[in-house]
Image: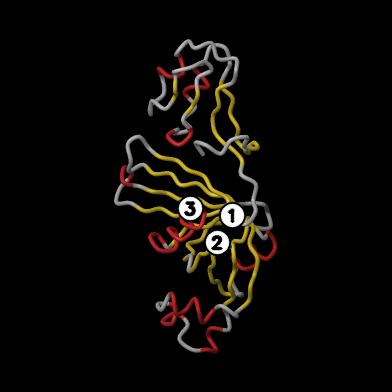
Amino acid sequence: MTAKNYLEYIVREIHTTIVATVDDEGLPVTAAIDMMAADEHGLYFLTAKGKGFYDRLVKRQYLALTALKGEDTMSCVAVSVRGKVRELGNERIPELFEMNPYMKEIYPTEKSMQALTVFQIYEGSGECFDLSKKPIERASFTFGGAEKRAEGYFITDACIGCGSCAAVCPQNCILTERIPYVISQEHCLHCGNCLTAYPVGAVEISRTGRKCKDHAGL
């Protein structure tokens, strides 16, 4: 799937997301926000200019969100996005109202619609985590020119092929056909068992992301 496919999935299949921003004290604040449109340029949503959420978006110009679908944990698909936002104004409001007609019940008149403004998440990265599949599936994506970086656990050339990491992997996603072993990133839970089990310290973790040499498996 492409980044556009994942963004459209958020809008079409999930719609309501939990969004996190940061307040003036540096503390996180969450809100339930509907994602109303998506294209190859990002995600689009509305908010009222009188809300604290609007102030945080204007000041920080950044957010993170998670969209969750599923009847229970084992049928769950979660798509997370974090990225830069910008205010577009009111030009696209009629279009978004047509695509999301329930908004006309909340803001029924043109005068009431004047409280609203459109924001775009125009550059960012995301991850889809699907627990409904066996083994689980994880995929990452970027859009708007954001640099793709690899996050998670990686086995280095220090691997001696002892099998300790593979023995404790709950998803059996460590490939042992050659040394060094390779973690199949698309099935990794990021549980950290391999890191603690390895006797020679051959597993590294990247929390902030490192530049990808190869996009395979991401």
Q: Secondary structure at mark 2?
A: loop
The amino acid type found where label 2 is placed reads Glu
Asked if marks 2 and 1 touch (Cβ < 8 Å), the reply is yes
Q: Is residue 49 left or right of residue 39?
A: right
Q: Nearer the viewer, mark 1 or mark 3?
A: 1
Q: Residue at x 52, y 64 (%)?
A: 39
Image vertical order of residue 148 relative to residue 177, above or below: below
User: Which residue is under mark 2?
Assistant: 40
Query: Mark 3, residues whose alpha carbon is within 10 Å: few (<14), some, or many (≥20)?
Result: some
Which comes sooner in the sequence, label 2 or label 1? 2
Which comes sooner in the sequence, label 2 or label 3? 2
User: Which residue is under mark 1?
Assistant: 143
Image coordinates of residue 55 in percent, x first then y, are: 65, 67
Q: CA distance from mark 2 to mark 3?
A: 19 Å
Please count the marks in the image. 3
Q: Residue at x 64, y 51 (%)?
A: 146
* Quadrant position of residue 52: bottom right
Image vertical order of residue 6 relative to residue 86, above or below: above
Q: Residue at x 53, y 17 (%)?
A: 180
Q: Residue at x 41, y 53 (%)?
A: 68
User: Which residue is under mark 3?
Assistant: 66
Q: Nearer the viewer, residue 166 or 113?
A: 166
Q: Secondary structure at mark 3?
A: strand
Q: Nearer the viewer, residue 20 or 121?
A: 121
Image coordinates of residue 19 in percent, x first then y, are: 52, 57
